[in-house]
């Protein structure tokens, strides 16, 4: 597939690197000559210097022959303009645009009414906001990801030194009598990613992901020593950008008492005009005296959502030490994510990861329903629809010969049945199937899953 990426920032580089590794032909357009030189060194891609809002530049980049356009510059206007150029001058079947404005819904309406055909408009703030809202009531859990329309849940947590299961193997944990339909799907250990087998031990410092059904989520959390809270009473938010304001408004609607701390006095005044019951504080969220003065001890949630990773990490660690029950940090640099987990921050979220996930879902179109990447893109959860004619239908899972580093995490049937399967389970046509795998073996997994009728076309492309 020929893919043209408008914009050469970190999100674009992440997307390009993944697409190149999966055999796609990628061209990147960026106006910064220094960044263009960096991209040429890092990636096996054609790099064109210029504005993606220029018809001449886009033609030079080969827009006429592109099968897909991904517009992820730092300008919403340029992203939309690039899609307009592609619609006029290209055979591109798929157009994707990232839009960061708070007027996202209005722009979706305008795009639809004017006839500009954009297959996917990505608003990372909305995706990250939903992820934060899912975990706010669960201390000790890094994230909760929904699959199969919410019928399958995946949650992450740290193995602490005093965890009752620290040092136990997967088999020993299974013998302890967990709720049915439960699976330890992935283990992150330092820089290593493990798709575990029965003899694999869980060690202090590991970050593990557990797959279960929606109805068993509460019992599984309690089995692992985590008690979800019924209500949120108080939440602190540090950072008054779009994400912080959006979460403050959402929490207000649920009756939560919210304090929002922002360094910029002028921005504080503007935020106060937008929110309703949120208390807006002009101050520094990394300052211990400020947090203590605002009575942080025992707060149900602390969200560090500034534009600076370092400030978010410092504020989160400080809040944790001062007694916040749930801490969330917004992290842009992906190489910070493993460190943040090891430091004990409950949850870290990334706009860039949210963007990559949405784009990959569209590149791997057809029967691929969702793609979720973990940490520095080292592992993936891939949700597919099992097609009639697929080679693996009617076979027991143990007979599928999945590549090492891949497992079936869950099967959701059309009749509503959901299972975390064992080796004797079989996949039926129409099932939603959730696979967990190491990123490096995605192409090998593709060859196993390919339906006979689609072998020449490819499964993920």
Image: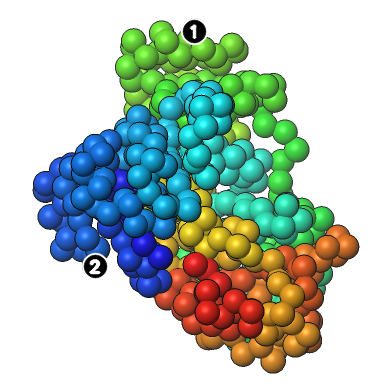
In the rendered image, the vertical position of residue 109 relative to residue 430, given as above or below: above
Nearer to us of marks 2 and 1 is: 2
Query: Where in the figure is residue 179, as x and y percent of width and height?
Result: 80, 67
Q: Which callout, 2 or 1, points at the residue further toward the start of the chain? A: 2
Furthest residue in direction right, as rendered: 415
Query: Where in the figure is residue 310, as x and y percent of width and height?
Result: 30, 41
Query: Where in the figure is residue 32, as x and y percent of width and height?
Result: 15, 43
- Dot 1, crowdedness within 10 Å: few (<14), some or many (≥20)? few
Count numbered badges in the picture.
2
Residue at figure coordinates x 55%, y 52% from the top left: 142
Residue at figure coordinates x 11%, y 46% from the top left: 33
In the foreground, 125 or 270: 125
Picture quadrant of residue 105: top right
- Dot 2, crowdedness within 10 Å: few (<14), some or many (≥20)? some
Query: Where in the figure is residue 81, as x and y percent of width and height?
Result: 35, 34
Residue at figure coordinates x 62%, y 26% from the top left: 251
Left or right relative to 311: residue 32 = left
Q: Is residue 357 visible?
A: no
Q: CA distance from mark 2 to mark 1?
A: 48 Å
- The residue indicated by pointer 2 is 44
Left or right relative to 21: residue 137 = right
In the rendered image, the vertical position of residue 118 relative to residue 205, given as above or below: above
In the foreground, 422 or 292: 422
Indicate which disc residue 273 carries: 1
């Amino acid at each position: 597939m020929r893919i043209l990426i408008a914009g050469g920032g970190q999100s674009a580089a992440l997307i390009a690197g993944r697409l190149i590794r999966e055999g796609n032909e990628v061209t990147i357009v960026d106006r910064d000559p220094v960044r263009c030189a960096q991209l040429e060194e890092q990636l096996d891609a054609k790099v064109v210097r210029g504005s993606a809002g220029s018809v001449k530049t886009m033609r030079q980049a080969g827009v006429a022959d592109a099968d897909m356009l991904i517009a992820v510059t730092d300008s919403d206007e340029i992203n939309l303009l690039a899609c307009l150029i592609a619609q006029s001058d290209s055979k591109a079947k798929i157009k994707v645009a990232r839009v960061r404005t708070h007027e996202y819904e209005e722009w979706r309406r305008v795009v639809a009414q004017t006839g500009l055909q954009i297959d996917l408009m990505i608003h990372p703030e909305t995706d990250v906001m939903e992820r934060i809202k899912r975990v706010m009531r669960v201390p000790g859990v890094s994230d909760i990801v929904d699959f199969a329309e919410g019928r399958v849940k995946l949650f992450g947590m740290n193995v602490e030194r005093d965890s009752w299961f620290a040092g136990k193997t997967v088999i020993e944990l299974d013998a302890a009598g967990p709720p049915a339909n439960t699976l330890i799907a992935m283990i992150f250990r330092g820089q290593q990613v493990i798709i575990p087998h029965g003899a694999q031990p869980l060690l202090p410092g590991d970050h593990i992901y557990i797959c279960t059904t929606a109805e068993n989520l509460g019992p599984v959390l309690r089995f692992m020593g985590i008690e979800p809270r019924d209500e949120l009473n108080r939440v602190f938010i540090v950072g008054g950008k779009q994400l912080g304001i959006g979460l403050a408004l959402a929490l207000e609607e649920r009756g939560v008492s919210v304090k929002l701390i922002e360094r910029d006095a002028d921005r504080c005044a503007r935020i106060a005009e937008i929110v309703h019951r949120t208390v807006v504080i002009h101050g520094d969220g990394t300052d211990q005296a400020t947090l203590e003065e605002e009575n942080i001890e025992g707060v149900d949630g602390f969200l560090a959502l500034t534009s600076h990773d370092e400030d978010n990490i410092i504020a989160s660690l400080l809040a944790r030490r001062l007694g916040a029950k749930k801490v969330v940090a917004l992290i842009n640099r992906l190489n910070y994510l493993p460190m943040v987990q090891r430091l004990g921050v409950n949850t870290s979220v990334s706009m860039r990861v949210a963007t990559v996930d949405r784009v990959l879902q569209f590149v791997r179109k057809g029967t691929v329903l969702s793609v979720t990447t973990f940490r520095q893109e080292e592992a993936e959860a891939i949700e597919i629809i099992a097609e009639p004619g697929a080679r693996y239908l009617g076979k027991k899972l143990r007979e599928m010969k999945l590549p090492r580093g891949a497992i079936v995490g869950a099967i959701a049937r059309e009749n509503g049945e959901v299972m975390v399967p064992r080796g004797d389970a079989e996949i039926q046509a129409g099932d939603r199937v959730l696979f967990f795998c190491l990123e490096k073996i995605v192409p090998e997994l593709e060859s196993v899953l390919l339906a006979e009728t689609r072998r020449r076309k490819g499964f993920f492309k």
